[in-house]
Image (cartoon, rainbow, N blue to C red):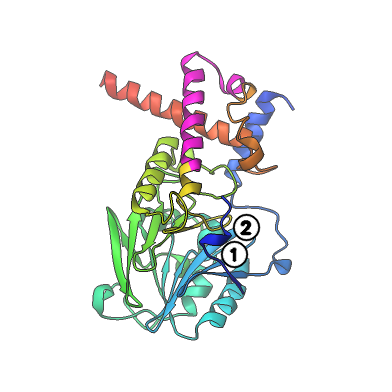
């Protein structure tokens, strides 16, 4: 096990390219990974908070005398390995799972990890599920449940045992667990329409899911309610919740959905990058440029070395495509509202 602290932080044609970016976005839950070779890495963030990482995705784990609370559950293929890694930290029951969004790499292990646990009956979660002896309580914003389930006669994205059992529909949800206030907040229209961030108030750690990614451009799912402005708003909220120890170093720590743990300076820089890229693309849209022309202008060029993935939905072209779609969708919506 590695121990992590603040001292360890460091700070074809264009049309075809755009089509490839769109296709990549639609398949963002289907990477080619040899899961048999993936090992779960455990990193201690605070005395009772850990980050477990596998296949490029992170989960947060809080342990204590009340049991275990998990934020996100990795891919389904890694669920058993994740349970084994959790058991090395604590033999207490897994009581809560909190889903920060509905993407497969964040909720895939819900069924297996949930069955390995047991729901608390009584207290602030009394009567959340019919049978309190069956599995951990799975908490999320209500739209996670809507995305994972399906209308009658249609096929659900995941089986019922992976669906949230305790949802909130506005604001947030509070849990007091292991002598700590755990606050779950919805951040609207960010990476998706169903994102939550999780604040461990005593430990001063925030699990932020896909709202912030330490090492790549964000994957904004415009088709499912995500937006560049919502993402910026979410990151502003996170920054407002953080307190640095020295300048922008130390203090509140972040566990992102992907990449290394981070501190205030990391997300401040990241938000600045997003705002600059948004403004550049907005300016090009105002000049009447098409998506292909915007991509050709390379509005992310000075950030690509740090954040552009080589393939998949976080490449520079994919990111520009989603920001363009987000801004043009917002413009169309505003125009419609003005006419009405």
* Circles 1 and 2: CB atoms closer than 8 Å: yes
Magenta region, residue range: 269-294
Instruction: Return the x and y of residue 118 as percentages of the image width and height.
Output: 41, 81
Please indicate, yes or no, whether residue 135 appears anywhere in the rendered image: no
Please indicate, yes or no, whether residue 43 appears anywhere in the rendered image: yes
Residue that carries the numbered disc 2 in the rendered image: 56
Q: What residue do we see at 53% from left, 74% from top?
A: 112
Answer with left or right where residue 267 lies relative to residue 121: right
Residue that carries the numbered disc 1 in the rendered image: 53
Q: What residue do we see at 41% from left, 52% from top?
A: 195
In the image, residue 20 above or below residue 64: above
Residue 279 located within the stretch drawn in magenta: yes
Answer with left or right where residue 28 lies relative to residue 47: right
Q: What residue do we see at 51% from left, 36% from top?
A: 273
Instruction: Return the x and y of residue 103 as percentages of the image width and height.
Output: 51, 54
Q: Quadrant of residue 332?
A: top left
């Amino acid at each position: 096990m590695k121990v992590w602290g603040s001292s360890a932080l460091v700070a074809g044609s264009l049309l075809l390219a755009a089509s490839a970016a769109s296709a990549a976005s639609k398949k963002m839950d289907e990477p080619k990974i040899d899961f048999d070779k993936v090992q779960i890495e455990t990193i201690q963030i605070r005395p009772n908070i850990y980050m477990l990482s596998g296949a490029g995705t992170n989960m947060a784990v809080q342990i204590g005398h009340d049991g275990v609370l998990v934020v996100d559950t990795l891919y389904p293929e890694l669920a058993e390995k994740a349970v084994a890694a959790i058991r090395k930290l604590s033999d207490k029951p897994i009581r809560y799972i909190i889903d920060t969004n509905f993407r497969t790499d964040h909720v895939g292990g819900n069924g297996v990890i949930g069955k390995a646990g047991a729901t608390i009956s009584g207290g602030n979660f009394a009567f959340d599920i019919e049978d309190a002896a069956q599995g951990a309580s799975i908490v999320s914003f209500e739209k996670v449940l809507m995305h994972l389930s399906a209308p009658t006669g249609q096929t659900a994205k995941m089986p019922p045992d992976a669906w949230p059992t305790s949802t909130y529909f506005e604001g947030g949800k509070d849990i007091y667990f292991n002598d700590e206030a755990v606050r779950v907040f919805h951040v609207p229209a960010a990476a998706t329409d169903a994102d939550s961030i999780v604040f461990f108030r005593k430990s001063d750690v925030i699990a932020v899911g896909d709202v912030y990614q330490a090492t790549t451009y964000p994957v904004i799912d415009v088709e499912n309610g995500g937006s560049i402005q919502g993402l910026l708003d979410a990151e502003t909220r996170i920054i407002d919740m953080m307190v640095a120890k020295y300048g922008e170093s130390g203090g509140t720590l972040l566990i992102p959905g992907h990449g290394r743990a981070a501190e205030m300076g990391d997300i401040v820089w990241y938000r600045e990058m997003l705002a600059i890229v948004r403004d550049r693309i907005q300016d090009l849209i105002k000049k009447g440029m098409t998506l292909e022309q915007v991509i050709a202008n390379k509005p992310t060029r000075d950030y690509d070395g740090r954040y552009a993935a080589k393939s998949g939905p976080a490449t520079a072209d994919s990111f520009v495509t989603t920001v363009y779609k987000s801004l043009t969708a917002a413009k169309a919506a505003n125009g419609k509202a003005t006419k009405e």
